[in-house]
Amino acid sequence: MDTANIEKTRYAETSSKADVNALVRLCEADMASVNATITERMQSDVSIIPALAEHLISAGGKRLRPLLCVAAARIAGTTNAHHHKLSAAVEFIHTATLLHDDVVDSSQLRRGKVAAHLIWGAPSSVLVGDFLFARAFELMVETDSLQALGILSKAAGVIAEGEVLQLMKAYDVGLSEAIYIDIISAKTAALFAAASESGAVAAGASVEKQKALRDYGMNLGLAFQIQDDALDYGGTAASLGKNAGDDFAEGKATLPLILAIAATGEAEKDFWHRTVSLRQQQEGDFARAQALMIESGAMAQTIDRAKVYARKAKDALKVFGASEWKAALEALADYSVERTK
Amino acid sequence: MDTANIEKTRYAETSSKADVNALVRLCEADMASVNATITERMQSDVSIIPALAEHLISAGGKRLRPLLCVAAARIAGTTNAHHHKLSAAVEFIHTATLLHDDVVDSSQLRRGKVAAHLIWGAPSSVLVGDFLFARAFELMVETDSLQALGILSKAAGVIAEGEVLQLMKAYDVGLSEAIYIDIISAKTAALFAAASESGAVAAGASVEKQKALRDYGMNLGLAFQIQDDALDYGGTAASLGKNAGDDFAEGKATLPLILAIAATGEAEKDFWHRTVSLRQQQEGDFARAQALMIESGAMAQTIDRAKVYARKAKDALKVFGASEWKAALEALADYSVERTK
């Protein structure tokens, strides 16, 4: 076996471990710069602003979007450091949308902590979101890339459109799978795609590679969101994550619910109408919804759909030769649909 | 008298009419393009977005900020049309901040119409604000000017900071004039300055002229806001505009109030504490506040302050030779402090 084949085999093995850790390790040095930029740029003389931003940002989360931006720049062979500022900008846009979403949904928790608007009030959450959004654009301007700016500003508009569409379609038991995909493409996958594509653009990647990384991000985002929505009903394991049940309680029409409503038909029409359209829920309803999803095959179908997108994400990477970056991105795609929390 | 002097005299006469009409007339053709761009770019397949945006945008207002951007480009002798997209972007940023402010302040009215959040709900107002903000950046990207983008994104961050600062200082009878100026510099004058400066930048103006137009916008914005705050108490005429009394009812510490509290001293301390700090207001309180402002000289002082800024705005234009644009901008500065509504 020659060296190249040994390399390929090694990467193939790495990619078989479905996790985010390989990517996190590879991005460690880059993310230290990104995190320093995030901390520096959320400062303000108006003290409530960094306090509120810090509350949410320090709670962490996986920072998947900046990781994607870094990885895209790296796999495209960047020789500059623009992806640090772009990644910080991507995290600011994401944080701004979380702050506004939590106000919009009156959420109680975010990243395991009390939602910011419950501590500082909804007005402050709205305004600090605006502040972070503006700071994101300031950071992008400093990268001198109008193309990256165009990609991320377009994504920001699409996210807002997706959120409004979701708001309009709340409690809609007749929501089609197509509109569900439209909503999650906009509210989630658009920023994954833009983070990845803008990283490639900042690295000076070819148009073919820019498109490949955009496609990777878009499909990864769809896989992630569908798996999230499956896990909100416990997935197939029926082992529940800490926020499981939220979507059902809110009457949010996500894919497991849409497919379960279609699969159970007339027999369960009244149950779904009462629990989702009217949100008149009683003890045992959530367990019954979970059972119906598993028995009707809706949950398995949901996870199959997520796997199709994860497969597409990996396929998009075929323009790249074997590398530790490619293996890590493949592992991330597998992780997106194999995780159980 | 030679032709140049006749021209100068004519412009001097024009500028002695303190109004916004000369500028509106000069900008007519430009503003037709700006308005077409605004209408085109607020569209979305998510129908509630253009409906909500249209509600606020069609209500008009003077469109002072886009007018300023156009005028700055014109007085700097622009030979391109970038100021149309920039002006539309400036109006979108302004509209986004109005939507969010009305949610933050729970306002009932805006531009004489029911506030959007009372019709479509606060969540939609927040999200449509985000949408317009994103669209603003998309428009700016199309002008290919990173410098203009930098100016406007910085202003957007400063506006949010100003709004948060104002929120923190509500009902503060001890607010200093210096912090009041900080607040209005950020929440109002920063966008006037950025609109004007970015118009100059898009026109390829010299650094000296960019600075002059920034200074003009900043001082005009301060003059405008102080006069607005004076008119909220009826100014010296005691003839009230339709929203007069709002600031007092909300306990907002604006300049007439700050100066009146300082001028009336110990004698009226209890009155201001009850009506502003505690917002325990009864019939006759607003009339008494107005009377105290006039008798103590606080209102006259307030209007004097506004006039100082209007004067500074006009002084900033001295780098430009006489022209109908210069005369119109001078007339606007005069109008900002002589208007009675």
Image: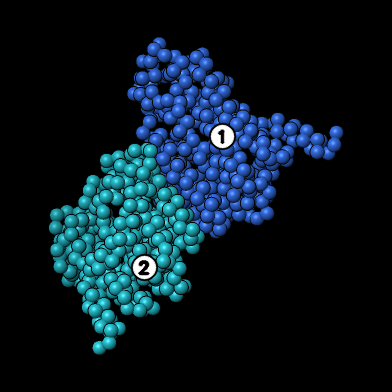
Chain colours: A cyan, B blue
Out of A21 and A27, give the one closest to the viewer.
A27
Q: In what element is the residue under mark 1?
A: helix
Q: Which residue, given by chain and number where applicable, does mark 2 sit on?
A: A74
Mark 2: few, some, or many residues within 10 Å (few <14, many ≥20)? Answer: many
Q: Residue furthest right?
A: B1
- Spot occupied by residue A2 in the image (x, y as percentages of width and height): 27, 87
Residue type beneath disc 1: Asn
Label 1: chain letter:
B
- Spot occupied by residue A225 in the image (x, y as percentages of width and height): 29, 64
Q: Looking at the image, which residue is at 26% across and 72% down?
A: A331
- Spot occupied by residue A332 in the image (x, y as percentages of width and height): 27, 69
Report which quarter residue B279 is drawn in. Answer: top left
- Spot occupied by residue A7 in the image (x, y as percentages of width and height): 27, 80
Q: Is residue A90 visible?
A: no
In the image, residue B114 above or below residue A166: above
In the image, residue B189 above or below residue A19: above
| Number of numbered tags placed on the structure image | 2
B270 left or right of B12 in image: left
In the image, residue B198 above or below residue A257: above
Spatial distance from mark 2 to mark 1, Cα to Cα? 47 Å
The quadrant of the picture occupied by the C terminus of chain A is bottom left
Q: Residue furthest top?
A: B267
Q: Is residue B258 visible?
A: yes
Q: Which residue, given by chain and number where applicable, does mark 1 sit on?
A: B219
Q: Looking at the image, which residue is at 25% across and 83% down?
A: A6
Label 2: chain letter:
A
Q: Looking at the image, which residue is at 60% across and 52% down?
A: B202
- Which marked residue is nearer to the observer: mark 2 or mark 1? 2
Report which quarter residue A254 is drawn in. Answer: bottom left
